[in-house]
Every structure is written in structure tokens, then in C-alpha cells.
Amino acid sequence: MLASLEKTPLTIFREMKLFIIVWVGQLIASIGSTVSAFALDVWVYEQTGSVTQFALISLANTLPLILLAPVAGLFVDRWDRKWTMIISDLLAILPTVAIAVLLLLGRLEMWQIYLANTLSAVFMAFQMPAFIASITLLVPKQHLGRANGMLSFMNGTARVIAPPLGGVLLGLISLQGIIILHITTVLLSLGFLLWVQFPKSNAAVASEESSFFKETTYGFSYLLARPGLLGLLIISAYSLFLVGTVQVITTPLVLSFAPVTVLGTIISLFGVAILAGGLLMGIWGGMENNMNVIYTCMLLTGALLMIAGFQASIVVFIAGIFLFFLIRPIIASSTQAIFQSKVEPLVQGRVFSIKGAIEAVGLPLGYITIGPLAEKVFEPLMSSDGLLAGSIGQVIGVGTGRGMGLLLVITGILTISTTCIAYFYPRLRLVEDELPDIPHDVTLATRDVSISARPTVGSQN
């Protein structure tokens, strides 16, 4: 077990105090921004009645993060990370302010919402890698798993709170009031951020590249030169693909054997699972060998997907997918801890930006591939008169939803198989032993740095 687990909670708090202050501010802003995003999504759907218009908002929020990753990472490494977060947050809320003004004047149109979301995402493409790259400056190595678990807890909290709170606030203070609340939470979180004096890294980075093209592609080159980290990134992206798979299947599969009133409760339960997984990781902190944790969790993920899809039972499905989402923060936190302990601080912006972009592709890839497969291929195969009704159908059942159940079973089998294959790749299995840790003086910098006495106003995650 980690040595940190033998310490008292007060000792752990002291060693993580800088990160905890920043994290509290990010938690406040995350709740505000998620509630605002939920309310705006509802407003768009109510105004247009179009699922396509609704989906375009998600595209506007995601595409800039992927396209700008190489450039954003380069500048994050060159700039002060604390001020990169502050300025990015301030610029990211300006489009939100514009939406509030246009809404107040009665002149808000759909294209303006897409533009505003795109601009906000552009600035957040700089904020997010700056935040992630700052963790190694704020947290000792032995607490990286705990810190990443707290990030998962933050995201889970926002996911659980946003829908019910957004629905209540829409009726009480309307969309304009929610946007003002969002802006207020960002300013409050900036106050926490300004309060903390970030430690400075003394680590040197050997880099001979000088051209802009080589600098922006440095993150790719870095990962290609370290196949263990690249393999770990592929596993992480695949786990997000599985999340997209589960999310796109959940609604139609649940509705195939349960009323719509049950669906909302189930989705909220899955948010609770993410929150619980993040809380568990935040308290536990992980193990010394993160790869063993990742391999074990991926095997469990495959088994749970098989169980969830094996029979048309709402109880079995909820139990299987609840545990699936409970495990997800453990995989994410362990993966991030390895990257944070192995990637030099002065290049983390570039590497983490590329990492985030590749991982971000996994989620929509699950949406666009699994949906058509379920609807056009597996559901017809598992209908009462389908080709597989007399064989596999005799085991898992036939009819509406059974094709999606079979797809979950197959996905689970593939996950177990690929995890076993990945275990026999030595560069991945031994990545924590073969790659050196980042300089020890960086990871312990928080012990010698005090909190800046500059409380003021003013992060969105």
C-alpha cells in the first residue's frame, strides 16, 4: 500500500492544501457551468424541437478541444499555468455574457449560441490542459491518484447536481438568472485560484525542435518515442469509447423493458456511481502499481458489460452499469497518475493536450458507431424472426432490446480479450518501471510553498 495511506488525514491535507484550494474553486465553477449548459440545452430544444440542433451544441463544445490541442499545449508549456487558467476562464465567460445580453434584448438566435459555445470551447482548450499540468506542481507524487480521484468526484458531482438543480432554477430564475449564476461561480473560483501561489518547476526539458510545426507536434513525437505511454493512452481512449457505447445504448435498452419514468432515475444513479468512484479514489489514493489497477478494472469492465447485456432484466442492467461507472474514475485516475509521474512538467501542456484530444475522440466514436450497429444490424438479428433468434436468442432472449444486449455482451468479450492481449505487451505492462519518474523536487514542491495572501474575486471546468 502507499506510504501516504499510513499518514493521518491532517498530514495528507497539509501536503495537498494548495491543490485542494484550487479544486474547491474548480468544483464551484464546474457546478455553475454544468447547470448553465443543461439549462441552455433545454432552452434550445424547447425553442426548436430538433434533436439535430441539440446535438450541434455538443459538437460546438467538443470540436475546438480536439482541433486546437497541439497549439494549445504548446502555449500552455510556454505560459505561466496559473495565469493561463485565469485568463482562459475570463475569456471563456465573455460569450456567455453575450448570450445573456442577447437573451435579455430578445435577439438571441441559434447560430449565436453555436458561435458562443465554440468560442468558449476555444478558450477552454487552453484552460483544461493548464489545470491538469498544474497538478504535478501542486501535489506530491504519492497523492496523484488521490488528486485525480477528486477530479472525478468533481465531475460526478456536477453530473448528479446539474439536471435537477437546472430544472428547478429554470422555473425560479429563468435562463438569464442561471447565466448570471454561472458567471458568479466562475468569478468565485478565480478568487480561489488567485489566492494560491503556484510552485515553480526547476526541471529542464531537452528539446531541440525550433520550428513551430515541430513544436506543435511535439506531443505526438513524445508519445511515439514512449510506446508504453502511447499504449496506455489507447487503453484510456478505448475506455471512453465504452462510456459512449453504454450511454448511446442505455436509453433505448432501458425503455425496451421499463417505463420512461424509470429512465431518469437510472441515469441519475449512474451519475452517483461516477461520484462515488471519484470519492473512493480520493480517499483510497490508489496503489503503487497503477498498471495492475488498470488491467484489473478493464477486466472487470468487460465482465460487467457482459452481465448487463445478458438478460432483459432491469435489476441486472442497473447493477452491471452502475458498477461500470463506479470503476471508470479508478481507470481514469490511475491512467492520469502515470502520465503525471512520467511526463516532464515543462512539456505536460503539449502531451496532455494531445492526450485529451485523442481521448475526446473515443466518446463520440462510441456514439456514431454503436448507434447504427445496434439499430441496423443487431436489433434485426435478434428479432423474433431474426437470423440469430434460434441460436443466441435461445440464451439471451429475443425481441426489442435484445440486439443491444448482445452488442453489450460482445463489447464485454472484446474488452476482456484486448486487455489480456495488452497485458503481454511489455512496454505497457512495465511502463511504470521502465520510464523514470519526474524530478522529485518538483513533486514535493508544495511542502515549501506558502499560500499567497491575495484574496480577490474571480474557473470553469
Image (cartoon, grey):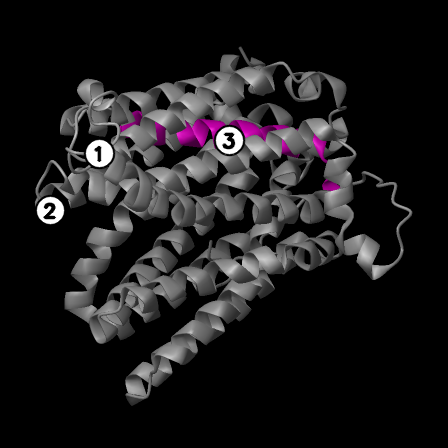
Query: Distance between the Cα atoms at labels 3 and 2?
Result: 33 Å
Q: Which residue in the protein does label 3 denote?
A: 333
From the top left corner, tell me how far across and down residue 340 is, in percent. 64, 34
Residue found 53% across the figure and 10% down from its top: 1
The answer to whether residue 386 shows anywhere in this view is: yes
SS of the residue at dot 1?
A: loop
Q: Please, what secondary structure does the residue beneath circle 2 have?
A: helix
**Mark 3: which secondary structure?**
helix
In the shown orientation, is residue 197 left or right of residue 63?
right
> Which-is-in-front pick, marks 3 and 2?
2
Q: Which residue is mark 1?
A: 386
Residue 59 sits above or below residue 177 on the image: above
Name which residue lies at 41% across and 31% down: 328
Q: Amino acid at mark 3?
A: Ser
As drawn, the label of residue 260 is: 2
- Whole-angstrom CA distance, mark 2 to mark 1, is 27 Å
Residue 454 seen in the current view: no
**Residue 38, horizontal then vertical, whole percent:** 30, 59
Disc 2 + disc 1, Cβ < 8 Å: no
At x 42%, y 72%, the residue is 114
Callout 1 touching callout 3 (CB < 8 Å): no
Q: Nearer the viewer, mark 1 or mark 3?
A: 1
Q: Is residue 178 above or below residue 229?
A: below
* Residue 203 placement (x, y as % from top left): 81, 38
**Residue 320 painted magenta:** no
- The amino acid pointed to by label 2 is Val
Write the start and end of the magenta stretch as one range: 321-345
Magenta span main SS: helix
Mark pair 1, 3: CA separation:
42 Å
Q: Nearer the viewer, residue 187 or 111?
A: 111
Query: Amino acid type of disc 1?
Result: Gly
Comparing 18 with 28, the one in front is: 28
